[in-house]
Amino acid sequence: MKRSEINKWLQYAVTFLEEKQFKLPPFAFWGPEQWERAGHEYDEIRDNMLGWDITDYGFGDFNDTGLLLFTIRNGSLKNPAYPKPYAEKLLIVQEDQKTPYHFHWSKMEDIINRGGGNLLVQVYNSTEEDQFATTPVTVYMDGRTYEVEAGSILRLCPGESITLPQRQYHQFWGEKGTGPVLLGEVSMVNDDRTDNRFYQETGRFPTIEEDEAPLYLLCNEYPAAK
């Protein structure tokens, strides 16, 4: 992705969240110079990858396959300095913009439609070989437990949520004609370095072409504290 495209989407996200009256912590608006001055007291942000996260999953077409996220809080599975057993994110999903099939080995998560359009979620169980299973999928939505056929597409309207257990494949996108979707994610500890199993080979973080200066740094770009 070009840095100019990333900057454009960050500006869009700030405006979108202001319209939805969703407030971000102060470090969301730090530029590169502020991160250069930030000391070790901010290591939790660096080490647990809090903050902005934009990806095209290596496919080179963010509008078709991509996601814009902000990680608000997160613990660590490996570092006892960060004992939080939970994480929280917000996600902004465009109409027909897919997050491709994946599951997590360790993380269970709730995806909550906080407002905007509808979210469509397609689900499969996984086999022992990490392929799509043909078995019925148990669905947990807002206190209701039921089964659907493998590959079923579920609709989350604003206010609705779904629980996604470990090793359950899912892909999601905004329903066409309903507008962009503001999602919340409440989960166990998030580890994007080791806990994602994508059905197709992907690149979790974008390769960036530096055609202009960064507006804000992404969560995998922070400089180490001096």
Image (cartoon, grey):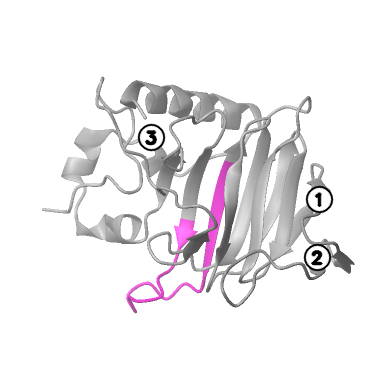
N-term mark: 2 or 3: 3
Q: Which residue is mark 1?
A: 154
Q: Residues within 10 Å of mark 3 (few under 14, many from 20)?
A: some
Amino acid type of the residue tagged 3 in the rendering: Phe
Amino acid type of the residue tagged 2 in the rendering: Val
Task: Answer whether labels 2 and 3 touch (C-beta < 8 Å).
Answer: no
| Image side of residue 40 versus residue 190, left or right | left
N-term mark: 2 or 1: 2
Q: Which mark identifies residue 139?
A: 2
How many numbered marks are there? 3
SS class of the residue under badge 2? strand
| Image side of residue 123 versus residue 141, left or right | left
SS class of the residue under badge 3? helix
N-term mark: 3 or 1: 3
Q: Which residue is mark 3?
A: 29
Task: State how far apart marks 2 and 1 are (Cα).
Answer: 9 Å
Give the magenta range: 73-91
Task: Answer whether labels 2 and 1 touch (C-beta < 8 Å).
Answer: yes
Query: Looking at this view, is 95 or 72 the one in front?
Result: 95
Amino acid type of the residue tagged 1 in the rendering: Leu
Which residue reaches farthest left? 226
Task: Answer whether labels 3 and 1 touch (C-beta < 8 Å).
Answer: no
Q: Residue at x 51, y 74 (%)?
A: 85
